[in-house]
Image (cartoon, grey):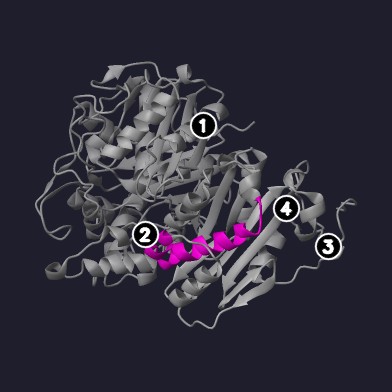
Amino acid sequence: MLCENLSPSVYICENFTILDSRMELFITRYIQLKNHQVIINGIVEYLSEEQSVSKLLRSVYRRSNIDYPKFFKMDNLSKLGFLSAEILLQGTDILQKYPGEELGIILGNASSSLKSDEEHQEFIRDRKKYFPSPSVFVYTLPNIMAAEIAIRHKIKGENTVFIFERFDHGFIYNYISELFRNQRVNCCISGWIDCYGDRYESFLFIAEREDMINRYKELQECIIFDPLNIEKLFKGESISWKI
Amino acid sequence: MVDVFIGADNTITSLGFSTAGLVEQIKANQIGISIYPGGNLYPTPVPLSLVDNRQLQDLFRQYLGETQPGLQPGSFTHLEMLHILSISDVLKSSGVNIKDPRTLIILSTTKGNIDLLEKDSYPVIEPDRIYLWKLAEFLQHFFGNPNKPLVVSNACISGVLAILIGSRLIKAGMYDHIIATGGDIVSEFVVSGFQSFQSLSPAPCKPFDAARDGLSLGEGCGTMVLSRDHSLCAIPEKIIVAGGSCSNDAHHISGPSRTGEGLYLAICRALKEAALDPPDIDYISAHGTATDYNDEMEAKALSRAALEPVPVNSFKGYFGHTLGAAGIIESALAIESMRNNELFRSAGFENPGTSKNINVLTDHIAKEVNHCLKTASGFGGCNAAIVFKKI
């Protein structure tokens, strides 16, 4: 499948059936936070010296140049999701292009809020030192990380957190396609946010419809939204930019 | 156009182990919330709605003996027993084959096997069943389904979401049948957490009432079969998932929006997809947790959506807030109302307690119900709305 009008830096995936050929979807930006690196559109933008996840997250926060005191109340899972979304969105204008009701957040996760769960459990382990805390308990749900993103950027549309053992690029592709096809979203932030102790990984991308993309400015960095590309981006594999 | 039919359902709560049994108890105005005197689940007395554990153990032992005699009850967590009995019940009546590759299990739960975090709670069970995906796979393998189950964990809207997402997957042609199973246990983890929020009532909860002062926690499991093939459905009436949506208030992680705009958005979209207008809705099964904020917000959203005159109830006054199970158990009861054209009193309600004049049911009444709206809201500002239609 060729698109003659696109710039040569767009990767075209062959041999794949798009569920609805009338509507082309593209990934217009993607970021990853893993192995102490912040990677934007495949390029390592920042490499941290920090060893612990907490210190790494604080260091990324400082570099992101925002002032958001609520950040310091979050658990690491929410901090990771929040920062990933922050970096993702800082480089786009989707918050201006789309009203909040048309934006969706669809995330995958494996460990749920296990670290915060263990912390809360520890506060109730000993009846003689029994101090359950609402500020910890509120983070014992995996959808709170999506909520923190929604609150920060006023994203009000479809939002769901799925729990997988591993990132399921095929399901994410199918489900997001359904959301677009039935006009439940006009733009979707999706990916994988997982954090347990020092094990963390985030991968977030923006999916948009072709007719909403500013061809002259942005199309250079667009990647066709299909399961193979999603998987490649997640794994950090290079995508050939030339047709 | 594919129709997604409600094929069968089961509910397990403090009021029994079947939907029919639950309906009987509701008709008899039985309340399943009682004062837990204090003990393992919490140091001091607190109203809770607990599944009859002795009966649960007996039924489960009997079930294992008949179907998997090589296995011991000790190899299953409390939650797993609930899910297995619930799923097995729907399979008895529905013709859907759980081993069919076109059947997907969707699990809805907020905390799963959270009691595995307690020291020595289950000596022979693998600790990794704390992972929700692992719990789901455990159920998948128990029943011999070939697909990795989908797990939805979105606070208290998970149950409604599971039904909604299941119907979307069927309509998209990805599966033909969905087994949506939602469950959560009452644990010290959850009781202590909600107490730290000061959101538990010292008495059985009173949704929408002027004197409401908090929610009552309940444990339970609800399972619903969805299918594109009505011939496989145990429910003879043709009741479909006509539309639905979820949204976020984008306001606060633990308090709902004061205006109810997120829930209002979800309701509007659900109605639009179902091709219905507000006057077409015959009955609303609301979330109604009996907290000050939720019920007020929900009333505002219903009012804004021009749904004030529609008879509405919350079931949480009967068996508490069952978290991940709530959306499925309460939808199953809404389906019963549609099947029998009867609406149930909103238990715990005596005097109107919201700033909007919503029509809370004060008695069990007969009423023709062709279109029903189910709503839910949860921590993290999420909301969901789903419309069921009789065709």
x and y percentages locating residue B36 in the rendered image: 12, 50
- Residue at the spot of label 4: A26
Residue A241, above or below A48: above
The numbered mark, 2 or 3, whose residue comes first in the sequence reads 3
Q: Chain of mark 2?
A: A
The numbered mark, 3 or 4, whose residue comes first in the sequence reads 3
Residue at image coords 10%, 51%: B45
Q: Chain of mark 4?
A: A
Task: Specify the amino acid type for callout 1.
Answer: Ala
Dot 1 alpha-carbon crowd within 10 angstroms: few under 14, some 14 to 19, many 20 or more: many
User: Which quadrant: the N terminus of chain B?
Assistant: top right
Residue at image coords 23%, 35%: B317
Task: Specify the amino acid type for callout 4.
Answer: Phe
Q: Residue furthest right?
A: A4
Task: Specify the amino acid type for callout 2.
Answer: Tyr
Instruction: Tell me, yes or no, whether the highlighted magenta stretch contains residue A73.
Output: yes
Highlighted range, magenta: A69-93
Nearer the observer: mark 1 or 4; the answer is 4
Q: Secondary structure at mark 1?
A: helix
- Residue at the spot of label 2: A139
Task: Specify the amino acid type for callout 3.
Answer: Ser
The alpha-carbon separation of the residues under discs 1 and 2 comes to: 29 Å
Residue B165, above or below B125: above
Q: Is residue B30 left or right of residue B289?
A: left
- Residue at the spot of label 3: A9
- Residue at the spot of label 1: B270
